[in-house]
Amino acid sequence: MTTVSHDAPAPQAVSMRRILPPVVTGQEIVLLAVLAVLWVLLGIFTPAFLTPGSIGPLLVQVAPIALIGVGMTFVIITAGIDVSVAGMIMVSAVVTARVLVGYDVPAIAAVALAIVIGAALGAINGVLIAYGRVHPIIITFGTSNLFLWLGLRVFDSSTVNGIPGTLEFFGRGAAGSTLGVPHSFAIAVVAVAVAWWFLRYAKAGRNLYAIGGNQHAARLAGIKVQPRLVWVYLTTGALAGLAACMIIATGTSTLDQSVGAGKELQVIAAVVIGGTSILGGRGSVVGTLLGAILVQTVVSGVTQLGWPTQLGFLFVGIFILIAVGTDLIRERARRRA
Amino acid sequence: MTATTTTPADERRAQPPSRVREWLGSGALRDRAVLLLALIIVLIVAMSILDAVGLTSGRFNSDYLASTLIAYVPLALLALAELFVITSGRGGIDLSVGSMVSLTGVVFAMLYQQAGLPLPVSIVLAVLFGALLGAVNGFLTAYLGYPALITTLATFYAYRSIALVVSEQRPISGPEISEFYNAAKSVELPVIGASLPLVPLGVFTFLIPVAIVAWFVLNRTTYGRKLYAIGTNDIAAQWAGIDTRRTRMMAYVTAGAIAGLVGVYTVAQFASARPDAGTSGSGMALPAITIAVLGGVAITGGIGRLSGILLAALLIVWLNASILLVVPGNEGAQAQLLALGVVLLGASLLSNATIRRRQAGAPGRPAVPATASGAPR
Amino acid sequence: MTDTAQRSTPAPRHDATPRLEMRDISKRYGGVRAIRHADLTVAPGTVHALVGENGAGKSTLIKILSGAEQADTGTIAIDGTAVTIGSTTDAIGLGVQTVYQEPQLFPELTVAENFFVGREITRGPMIDWRAQAPRMLELLDTVGLDRQVASQPLGALSIAQQQQVSIAKALLEQASILILDEPSAILTDAEIEVLFAVVRRLAADGVSIIYISHRLDELFRIADAVTIMRDGETVSTEPIGELSVREIAERMVGGAIAEGVHETGELGEPVLELDGLSLAGAFTDVSLTVRAGEVIGLYGLVGSGAAEVGEVVYGMRRATSGRMRIAGSDRQPSTPSEAKRRGIRMVPANRSSQGSFSFQSIAFNITVGSLGLLGKVPGWVSPASERRIADDLIRRLAVKTPTARQPLGAMSGGNAQKVVLARQIVEQPRLLVLAEPTQGVDVGAKEEIHRIIADLAARGTAVLVITTDLAEVQRIADRILVFRSGRVARALPPTATQASLLAAAAGAEDEPATQEDDR
């Protein structure tokens, strides 16, 4: 960039805050408020709710959703979608579980394996979407079937039994948390923090918003759209692989074929509740984390209140509509202004 | 997979390859129905050969094919529901059809078994209830401007939850419903039936009437024209004086009504109303969307034909049935997933390539409206 | 991406070597010749105006220079060196920057980010905001934008501000040739002054500016030389001082005064009467009357507000004040379908986004606006009557197609436009509003469309033609209302000279409009 004079001092009148996008979005504040209200209400009506014995497991369950949600936020910011998450989780989980049962591998190797498998599957999605130019929802419907087939083949019509406690670092037990903070949740938070930094400060991250806002213009602006797309789906896959380790660790010593089922929609729900626009170009990973916590709070809270567990999902549906609805109203107000 | 091997083009193999390309480009394969029909024929021929040389675990014959149609009815109907919604454009999609099937099935069973209403009344009320559920989707999407993916993701959760809660997660069954099982089982057709295989009754009582009505709606009514118009170019439809919101909403209502009918059908099929009938496993919505796309429905709207839906569903059902004969046991069920994935990816990548080639030659690119705000200036 | 735009600093200029030399450029789209044997030579550090009527080939020429399209034949040289421009990246690398009419920006990103998107200054993987800030703020000053906007999402800015951003953005990198595609069309007078100051400063710095505009008067204030295009050819290139508005106008339209002015038929009752009609942000205090059998032309430059009048009449938008009488009724149509019921039809300006159902058949496209006629039973469609109606209109409008089943998207501009027009005249409308009825249409089809319009008027339809095409409005209108800055500036007969029409629309004559009494 030859024309930019690096030696010119930055004008004092303008602080960096004036140039950077806002730190917190309206949606995140709303979500925080809603969460606070929910936690207080649940604390009042079910005294057991606001205890470490209740919050800890809740956060453990949030972790895989929030973690995959980071990747899904990237994907949705680029105006894409990935409905093959369940398949990627299943393949990573079952292969890792088999390796854990069959060989005496250290935890780090198992985690690396799961991540590599997830990344490979995600890369398949990414390449087909970026270069096949078919709508992502169709591609990932297709690959979802392939991944499920692959996973079921590895299951070989049975469950994987006798999984050792190698991954207890992610588990619900004492080895799974430090000072009451579950490791898996801490990892999810770290991932969110890194992704937040990435989306806010890194060139590659900012470019994702441009791609989602107007892919054609992004290409004209010189952004390498296709490699970026491959990269976001690959990341989602890798995170699904890591999440699979958490799912193995938090389960029993048996892994059955339902692993991962329904996770794709839970992750998408967390992302859209978090304020990421399904049309692309706008979104935040912090919102996704809050969205994942909100979903899990509602589901756990309903159970703890003694209501039918399934009723929780009615509220999840309603929360999706409210979250996106307030976003729609804000957008319309902004456009009119 | 290449359908060219069974075509007349084969006989001209001596000709330069440009002839084949010409034929391919002329539109025969572009028509998804022809492609699907060719694939079905390839499948039947291949399976007949395998059957003849004894590589199948059971007989591959017309009786077997006819009996598998019991799974064809709900699949084709829900794909038809998706046809309406996806064709309406602006990112139209319905993730909630499976939940609507569960919920209307439960409601139907409550009306028919527990409240003791007559069968026709129960069916009509269940279908109307499905339409009401669809109307919620349609109102949120068409009038309030929610993206369809969001609306139907939310109602997917909501309807599924309601179905499980009101039924207390227990299937509803009883003598009336067991009797109703007859509506789905295989029958011999009157008059000409003796020489034909037994076909599940549901094909005649559910699928064919709906397909005929849907064909007329799509091809012979002003509503059909409006639906294709808003899906092709929403802004141009507004300029043409079409009430785009109302038209779009009706697509979701139709999808809900069809899902309601499938809800009734599944009750007959399983002889009980399972509250997770449409949502267990990966649910019914994802296969329905898959079949619709395979049947040539453009995810961007405005393109989609009934023939494609019926043939795509038939291809998948028979492909699945064939796989079970060739690959035994659980492995067969798994291979069905593989087959569905490969066929979907292959068909959509192939058709995308043809569309792109066609667009490259045409002066005016189709102006598919953006999904974002589209109020004309 | 930081290296693509690098380019050796231009050597000191000798006036002998033109900055840009495009020679013998030709381009076809399908069967249509967009430009043929066009030449464009631009000296360094000058403002070079490129003018021509709509469809004269200006935008195609510019697209070729900016790499968005490739020429079929011809050569391009920059600073005396022959270059190949195969892509927009190539063009940018050669120092050719383009500011399009509809800027390719990202509404969700902040203004600051829009500047640098795709070519961010980075430190490691991070965007170096501090390094970007000074230059960006300087450029915001240059184009007269408040520094406060830097952190706002671009979508929150006005259209004019967004355009200022895109001009500033184009200056970010080394630009030796800056193309401005109708930059003034959507700017206010004050904003235009700012724009001119920027343009002059850039030219003084040695940048060559190719300035495309319809406002001929402003060219005399900003341009050094002018190249005039007509029908895909470059007619002349001269220093602007050697020409007058009238001479430019005459060369643009080929010197012809009027090619057979439309014969006014018998006028009937008033069909449309507007009285002091206003739409905030678009037009103010518009009064006009269209009688049965009469063709009124609303002529104005892009952004004059004339287009919005049609949208209000057709019920796409509601007027903010004023009265509208349609066939004696004071009710304003609130939707197009209501307008249709009252006999008003409109052909929208943008054929592809507002008029075309491109992958549907011609028959579909013709009948989709008159679905009620397609069956005896309401709601029903009879393929036979659909075919009859479609075939009838295909014949009447001489649409060239083997069959009515052909998809519209496969047709040429002229034929597609006839189909879109056919949709609105399936039943003879009481009032027909046409916006840009022949934009992007070849000469033959243009002729035929004009004949169809005259025909409809002769059979008693009131016609309101809204156009930016000077020859067109002269040719088909019985009376012409010239629009400027949201108002009716003048009312003229079609026999008025083209120069006076252009002048009225371009704002050269600032005296109050001498309006005719019969308005």
Image (cartoon, grey):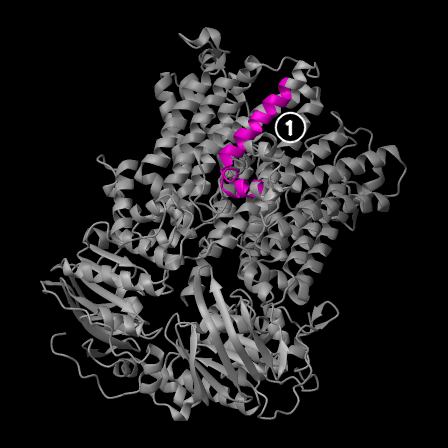
Depth order, front residue of A324/C29: C29
Depth order, front residue of B143/C514: C514
Q: Name the residue under label 1.
A: B336
Q: Residue A266, how many percent across, how many down?
A: 60, 42
Residue for point 62% across, 46% down: A82
SS of the residue at dot 1?
helix
The answer for which chain carries disc 1 is B
Residue A258 lies in what quarter of the image? top right
Find the magenta span and give its range: B20-48
Residue C418 lies in what quarter of the image? bottom left
Q: Residue C122, how many percent across, how many down?
A: 70, 72
Q: Is C220 positioned to the left or the right of A60 in the image?
A: left
Residue B213 in the image: above or below residue C170: above
Quadrant including the C terminus of chain B:
bottom left
Give the residue at the far front of this rendering. Answer: B14
Please say whether residue A16 is one of the residues in the magenta stretch.
Answer: no
Residue for point 44% across, 60% down: C31
Residue C404 in the image: above or below residue C343: above
Please say whether residue B40 is one of the residues in the magenta stretch.
Answer: yes
Q: Residue A102, how many percent across, how many down?
A: 87, 33
Residue A309 lies in what quarter of the image? top right
Residue for point 64% across, 75% down: C93
Total count of labels: 1
Is residue C184 at all visible to an observer of this figure? no
Residue C382 in the image: above or below residue A189: above
Depth order, front residue of C84/C427: C84
Q: Is C243 positioned to the left or the right of A167 in the image?
A: left
Q: Is the magenta stretch mostly helix, strand or loop?
A: helix
Q: Residue A22, how many percent across, how many down?
A: 58, 68
For mark 1, does the 10 Å Cα neighbourhood hold few (<14), some (14 to 19), or many (20 or more) residues? many
Q: Is A266 positioned to the left or the right of B173 in the image?
A: right
